[in-house]
C-alpha cells in the first residue's frame, strides 16, 4: 500500500511502534482469529474422524457426519455438497441426484453469506500446511525464485472444468490435495502425502502463497462466489495511518488496494478469505468485519460528512 502525502510518515511509524509495544495479553488477543481458524479446521476433521472411527452419532443409528469435504451429510438430515465438485460432475456428463443439488445449494448459499473464500481460510485443511510454509518463509532466508500472476488460478479453474467435459470425470477431484489430505488424516495416508509435501516446498522455497494464492482452482471458484458475500472487511479511512502492517500479513495483499478501499469503504475483492489477519493486527482498529449493507450506509454517511463538514 502506498503512503499518500496527506498522512505524515510519523503517524505510520507511531502505529508500528504501538503495534510492537503491545502487552502479552494484547498480542494473544491479536491471534484470536488464527486460533479460531485452527479450531474450526481441526474440529471439522475431528467430526469426520469421530464418526468414521468412534461411531459418533447424532441420534441412535444416525451418524454425526458422514462423507468428506466434497459431499457429506450432517446428522442424517442436512446434505452438503461442494458446488465446484458438483459442477465438475455435471460437466462430466453425470446426472446429479436431488440430494446433491440441494446440498450444493445449501453450501453455496452459506458461503455467499459469510464470504466465499472463508472456506479456504477456515475449513480447508491444506491452509494449515501453507500457513506453516508462509510462517517459515518469514523466519528463514528464503527468496522468491519467480513470480506468477494471481489470476492464473482462474485459468486453472477453467482448465479443470474443460478437462471434466473431455475426460468424463470430475478432473480436480481426482488430484485434489484437499481431498487427499482429508481422506489421509481420517483413513490413513497413502501416496497423497507427496502432493502435500510438494505444496509445502513450493510455498516455502519457490513462491510465497504459491498454492492458495496463485494455483488452487477451488480457491478461484470461491473467489467468484465471494464477490457477492454479505460479510466483508470494513475500512475506516479516518483512523488509518497507512503503516502497511495489514498488507504485510495478508496472504492476498492485492485486495487491500488503498484507492479502492478509500473509494468503497470495504474490501471489495472476492479473493479476500476473511482470515482476520488484518483486522486483528491493525494497530488503529481501522479494519473490522461488518455486513455489506451496514458498511455502505456508514461509508455514505462518512462521505456526506466530509462533503458538508458544517
Image (cartoon, rainbow, N blue to C red):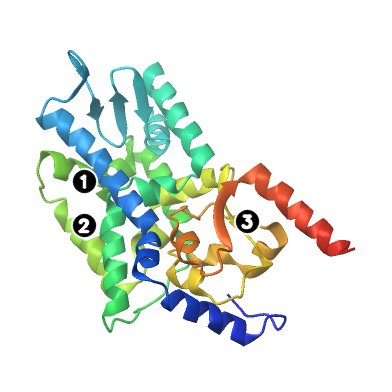
Quadrant where the N terminus lies? bottom right
Name which quarter of the figure residue 67 lies in: top left
Residue 271 appears in the picture as rendered? yes
Residue 176 as seen in the image, left or right of residue 117: left
Residue carrying label 2: 196
Earlier-in-chain disc, 2 versus 1: 1
Spatial CA span between label 1 and label 3: 35 Å
Are dots 2 and 1 in contact, CB under 8 Å? yes
Instruction: Tell whether 287 sits left or right of 66.
Output: right
Q: Quadrant of residue 80?
A: top left
* Quadrant of the drawing holding the C terminus: bottom right
Mark 1 or 3, nearer chain start: 1
Residue 194, image x and y in percent? 16, 57
Mark number displayed over residue 180: 1
Q: In the image, what residue occupies the spot 23% across and 24% down?
A: 64
Picture coordinates of residue 265, whole percent (x, y): 67, 58
> Where residue 99 sits: x, y (%)?
38, 19
Cα distance, mark 2 to mark 1?
9 Å
The residue at 58%/42% (across/down) is 230
Q: Which residue is mark 3?
A: 266
The number of callouts visible is 3
Measured in 3D between alpha carbons, the distance from the residue under mark 3 to the one under mark 2, in whole angstroms, is 34 Å
Residue at 31%, 62% in the rendered image: 131
Assign a secondary structure to mark 2: helix
Amino acid at each position: 500500500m502506498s503512503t499518500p502525502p496527506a498522512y505524515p510518515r510519523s503517524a505510520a511509524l507511531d502505529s508500528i511502534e504501538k503495534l510492537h509495544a503491545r502487552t502479552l495479553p494484547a498480542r494473544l488477543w491479536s491471534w484470536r482469529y488464527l486460533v479460531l481458524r485452527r479450531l474450526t479446521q481441526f474440529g471439522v476433521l475431528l467430526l469426520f474422524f469421530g464418526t468414521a472411527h468412534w461411531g459418533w452419532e447424532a441420534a441412535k443409528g444416525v451418524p454425526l457426519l458422514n462423507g468428506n469435504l466434497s459431499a457429506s451429510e450432517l446428522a442424517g438430515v442436512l446434505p452438503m455438497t461442494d458446488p465446484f465438485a458438483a459442477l465438475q460432475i455435471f460437466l462430466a456428463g453425470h446426472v446429479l441426484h436431488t440430494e446433491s443439488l440441494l446440498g450444493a445449494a445449501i453450501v453455496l448459499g452459506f458461503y455467499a453469506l459469510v464470504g466465499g473464500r472463508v472456506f479456504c481460510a477456515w475449513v480447508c485443511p491444506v491452509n494449515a500446511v501453507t500457513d506453516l510454509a508462509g510462517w517459515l518463509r518469514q523466519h528463514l532466508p528464503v527468496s522468491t525464485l519467480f513470480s506468477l500472476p494471481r489470476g492464473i488460478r482462474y485459468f486453472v479453474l477453467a482448465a479443470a472444468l474443460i478437462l471434466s467435459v473431455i475426460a468424463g470425470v470430475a478432473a480436480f477431484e481426482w488430484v485434489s490435495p484437499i481431498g487427499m489430505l482429508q481422506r489421509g488424516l481420517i483413513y490413513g495416508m497413502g501416496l497423497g502425502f507427496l502432493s502435500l509435501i510438494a505444496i509445502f516446498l513450493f510455498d516455502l522455497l519457490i513462491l510465497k502463497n504459491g498454492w492458495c494464492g496463485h494455483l488452487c482452482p477451488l480457491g478461484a471458484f470461491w473467489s467468484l462466489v465471494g464477490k457477492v458475500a454479505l460479510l466483508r472487511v470494513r475500512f475506516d479511512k479516518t483512523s488509518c495511518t497507512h503503516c502497511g502492517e495489514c498488507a504485510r500479513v495478508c496472504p492476498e495483499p492485492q485486495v487491500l488496494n488503498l484507492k479502492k478501499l478509500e473509494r468503497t469503504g470495504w474490501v471489495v475483492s472476492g479473493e479476500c478469505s476473511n482470515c482476520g489477519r488484518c483486522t486483528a493486527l491493525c494497530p488503529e482498529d481501522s479494519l473490522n468485519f461488518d455486513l455489506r449493507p451496514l458498511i455502505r450506509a456508514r461509508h455514505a454517511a462518512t462521505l456526506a460528512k466530509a462533503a458538508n463538514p458544517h
